[in-house]
Amino acid sequence: MKSGYFADIGLEVHAELQTQSKMFCGCPVLDSTRAEPNTAVCPVCAGMPGTLPVVNDQAVAFGLRVALALDCEINEVSQFARKNYFYPDLPKGYQISQYEYPLAEHGLLPVLAEDGWKDIRIRRVHLEEDTGKLTHIHNEDEAYSLVDLNRAGIPLLEIVSEPDMHSLDQMLAYTRALRMVLQYLGVNSGDLEKGVIRFEANVSVRPEGSDALGTRVEIKNLNSFRTMTAAVAYELDRQTALLDAGGKVAQETLGWDETAEVTVSQRSKEEAHDYRYFPEPDLPPLVISPEQIATAKASLPERPDRKFRRFQRELGLDAYQAEVLTDDRLTAEFYEATLHAMSNPNAALAANWVTGELFGLLNASGAALEDLQIDPAGLAALLDLLMAGRINNATAKTVLGRMAATGQGALAIIEKEGLAQVSDREAIAAVVRQVLAEHPDEVRAYRAGKVALRQWFFGQVMRQMRGQANPGIVQEMLKDYL
Ligand code: ADP
Ligand code: ZN
Ligand code: MG
């Protein structure tokens, strides 16, 4: 984008709410990338005349959780509305959404961008239903479209931000943070490649120093971070170049042409769709009681950005470790539970073991944390033994591997396999003397100034003692005897 301009970006994020059943009928919510097409369809979500929608309480509860997590004000009465348009993926001819009276408004999500923390205001959060999925086929001799209604009627939450993002980096920080919130709340898997979160970006530019927002375009159907970044970057370049040349940005709806890597006009403001919104006559107003709000609030997990900051501030972790440990809720909770279970909680040590050794085990085996045969109490017991000097660091790593393989506790493994650390000075001294006696050449070389050999002697002693010697005492003895 050309210099001298300021970017304003506002996002509309559509997140599937991964409930058991659809928004207004009993059909199951299936993984649309795996299920046979049109196997989760009933007269309601197929839009048959005479059918009636029934609101899915679970979807409302999920939406409420997200809205509260984003610190929104909840509207105790909101209203479903019909958004009318005609398209083959929409069997009823309208989508049930919320319009004038959304579920929630005025939220806030702080996000950590390259230039520091930034508050992104949330304009509104509303409930709606997803459309079906079209697959367009172009063969040599025919062209047609396939309709899969498995997705039609899956609950969607639309989260609309204010135009508070001013760079691609801030936009990505916001979308990543929002995705993480949805994952923490257990309402969405965050699998973008499965289409469970989709974006629309509103983009405008204005001359630096100007107070008035520029004319915006809306880019539809952005389904990955990569596509969104490419499309918005393209628009920022296009709009600033246009203004620079004395032109004007037209308000329009655009799509992203993946192949040509350009935005393409879908419709201009003049031909803007008139959705003829009106209150959905088949559904009563959606009422959220203060008790529902209180219950939902009480069950919210700590939001990832707050956890991240707390890990830094209260536990003294560095930004990298705090980020790795809060990236996913299970990991964060595993870490905190380990810390609490330690008799002498050491935040840095536990962080090193979770992000280092434990992640190493998971990577090597391809297993997930929840499949691991080690629970936080088990890891804490191992770290307690390490801190008490009952085993040394190298042995602790071995023991962790055995714990993962056998499901046994650290103490049982240490006792059964005789792995306890040897701190007996006489026993260590005896091995040190033996090693020096067996290697007179190296001893001479060391004394002649080749001091790096001390590490080699250390290795020899440790090997003789099956890695179980107290390394501090070994170093001390070597120094004395050499
Ligand atoms: P619509 O429903 O027609 O899309 P909204 O007023 O709901 O219009 O705005 C949708 C999104 O557009 C919001 O995310 C908002 O932040 C963003 N937006 C509005 N004006 C601008 C602008 N001038 N530049 C960038 N984004 C904008
Ligand atoms: Zn159905
Ligand atoms: Mg819009």
Image: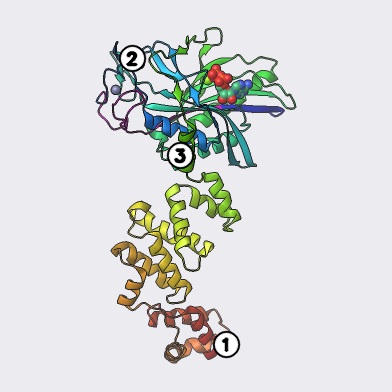
Q: Nearer the viewer, mark 1 or mark 3?
A: 3
Q: Give, as a three-letter code, the residue at label 2.
A: Pro
Q: Mark 2 points at which residue?
A: 91
User: What colour scheme was applied to this rendering of the protein?
Assistant: rainbow
Q: Which residue is drawn at 40% across and 62% down?
A: 377
Nearest the viewer among 467 and 243 is 467
Mark on residue 295? 3
Residue 471: within the magenta?
Answer: no
Q: Which of pointers 1 and 3 lies earlier in the amino acid sequence? A: 3
Q: Can residue 390 be seen in this view?
A: yes
Please indicate whether residue 376 sits to the left or right of residue 209 in the image.
left
Please report whichever mark, 1 or 2, sits nearer to the chain's N-terminal start: 2
- How many numbered marks does the figure carry? 3
For mark 2, give the secondary structure.
loop
The magenta region covers: 11-38
Kind of residue at disc 1 = Ala
For label 2, the crowd category at 10 Å Cα-Cα, with few meaning under 14, some 14 to 19 and many 20 or more, is: some
User: Which residue is disc 1 drawn over?
Assistant: 448
